[in-house]
Image (cartoon, rainbow, N blue to C red):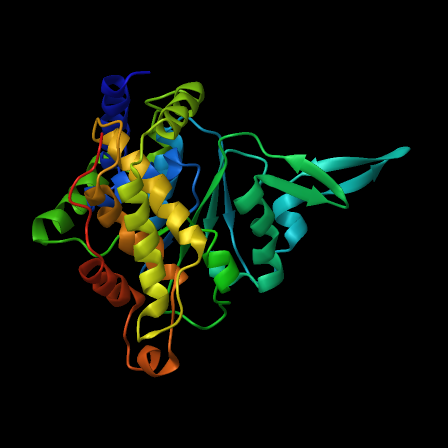
């Protein structure tokens, strides 16, 4: 697949999702960039903003098998990964919903840490271990999770180790204006039902999507851009408001996402603007603020904004 075809396919995917989801196109494009890297996505925002709708529509558009888990306080790890059951004269594996391509983890913070931890191995290594036996997950595999950041009753905040395994965290946000709010109402009238994703058709096959992922791996990244990424990540650790800065996994996230964005723009090389475009979404959730600043309501995104201003942008990038 050449870059022209790649870009056309990406535009078709984004357009198909936007036919269902009314909101910021940039969020859809960054979701696609993350999935092209086989990365896990966390949507964190207030209730009723279309987080689950966006996740379901995206999974169907890329032609992948997907399963949805509604996380609840009584959900057990075996309900996610599966278990072995005695049948006749031997134990047989009963696979859980994690054996899919796209796992929609709805309201992931409603389950206790033990259940959340059942996803850790799959999110990082694309495999699960059940009673001592390891099973590989079919490629592509990634988790698209949603959570409500304001409701505390009956929820269990995601631990930092699990947050770090999400390639990107985004907030869809409220509709930008009255016209966008009205468009949501118009589409509901046209659909004649609450869930339009039932009628969404794939615009690419699973094999085509795998090929698109391979194209991203061939994008060139100059040493000057690699240095820029490394300095951004290191600057988050020196910031006065920060207790713990981004892990090296944050730098890898910037590398992967910037390569995907370059490809989506029709380029086979990364420029600094690709890195800057996803810096907040890739780094903010990996930063732990000092308590005094967290109590004052300072957000980690402010730290990323500061380091973007502080770190010098490469002047020349060799294509």
Picture quadrant where residue 130 is located: top right
Residue drawn where x is 26% and y is 31% of the image: 269
Foreground pick, 245 / 15: 245
Q: In the shown orientation, is residue 252 left or right of residue 92?
A: left
Residue drawn where x is 51% and y is 64% of the image: 159
Taking the view exactly as shown, the residue that stands out farthest to the right is 89
Q: Tell me: residue 28, above or below residue 178.
A: above
Picture quadrant where residue 76 is located: bottom right
Does residue 117 appear in the picture of this structure? yes
Q: Tell me: residue 180, above or below residue 245.
A: above
Q: In the shown orientation, is residue 301 left or right of residue 67?
A: left
Residue drawn where x is 22% and y is 33% of the image: 318
Q: In the shown orientation, is residue 135 left or right of residue 34?
A: right
Quarter of the image with the N terminus in it? top left
Residue drawn where x is 20% and y is 35% of the image: 190
Q: In the shown orientation, is residue 306 left or right of residue 37?
A: left
Quarter of the image with the C terminus in it? top left
Does residue 194 appear in the picture of this structure? no
Residue 257 image offset from top left, x and y in percent = 33, 41
Picture quadrant where residue 317 is located: top left
Residue 20 image offset from top left, x and y in percent = 26, 37
Foreground pick, 271 / 87: 271
Residue 43 image offset from top left, x and y in percent = 36, 52
Q: How many marks?
A: 0
Residue 32 image offset from top left, x and y in percent = 32, 36
């Amino acid at each position: 697949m050449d870059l022209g075809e790649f870009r056309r396919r990406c535009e078709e995917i984004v357009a198909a999702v936007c036919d269902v989801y009314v909101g910021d196109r940039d969020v859809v494009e960054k979701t696609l960039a993350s999935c092209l890297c086989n990365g896990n996505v966390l949507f964190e925002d207030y209730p009723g903003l279309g987080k689950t709708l966006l996740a379901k529509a995206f999974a169907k558009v890329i032609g992948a098998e997907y399963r949805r888990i509604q996380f609840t306080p009584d959900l057990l790890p075996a309900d996610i990964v599966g278990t072995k059951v005695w049948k006749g004269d031997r134990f047989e594996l009963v696979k859980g919903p994690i054996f899919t391509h796209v796992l929609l983890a709805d309201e992931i913070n409603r389950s206790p840490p033990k259940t959340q931890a059942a996803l850790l191995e799959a999110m990082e290594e694309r495999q699960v271990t059940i009673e001592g036996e390891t099973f590989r997950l079919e490629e592509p595999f990634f988790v698209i999770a949603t959570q409500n950041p304001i409701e505390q009753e009956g929820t269990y905040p995601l631990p930092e180790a699990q947050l770090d395994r999400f390639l990107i965290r985004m907030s869809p946000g409220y509709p930008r204006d009255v016209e966008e709010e009205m468009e949501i109402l118009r589409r509901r009238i046209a659909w004649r039902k609450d869930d339009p994703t039932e009628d969404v058709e794939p615009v690419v096959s699973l094999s085509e999507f795998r090929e698109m992922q391979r194209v991203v791996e061939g994008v060139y990244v100059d040493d000057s851009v690699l240095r820029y990424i490394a300095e951004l990540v290191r600057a988050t650790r020196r910031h006065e408001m920060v207790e713990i800065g981004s892990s090296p996994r944050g730098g890898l996230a910037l590398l992967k996402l910037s390569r995907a964005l370059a490809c989506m723009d029709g380029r086979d090389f990364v420029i600094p603007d690709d890195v800057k475009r996803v810096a907040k979404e890739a780094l903010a959730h990996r930063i732990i603020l000092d308590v005094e600043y967290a109590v004052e309501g300072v957000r980690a995104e402010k730290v990323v904004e500061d380091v973007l201003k502080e770190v010098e942008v490469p002047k020349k990038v060799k294509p």
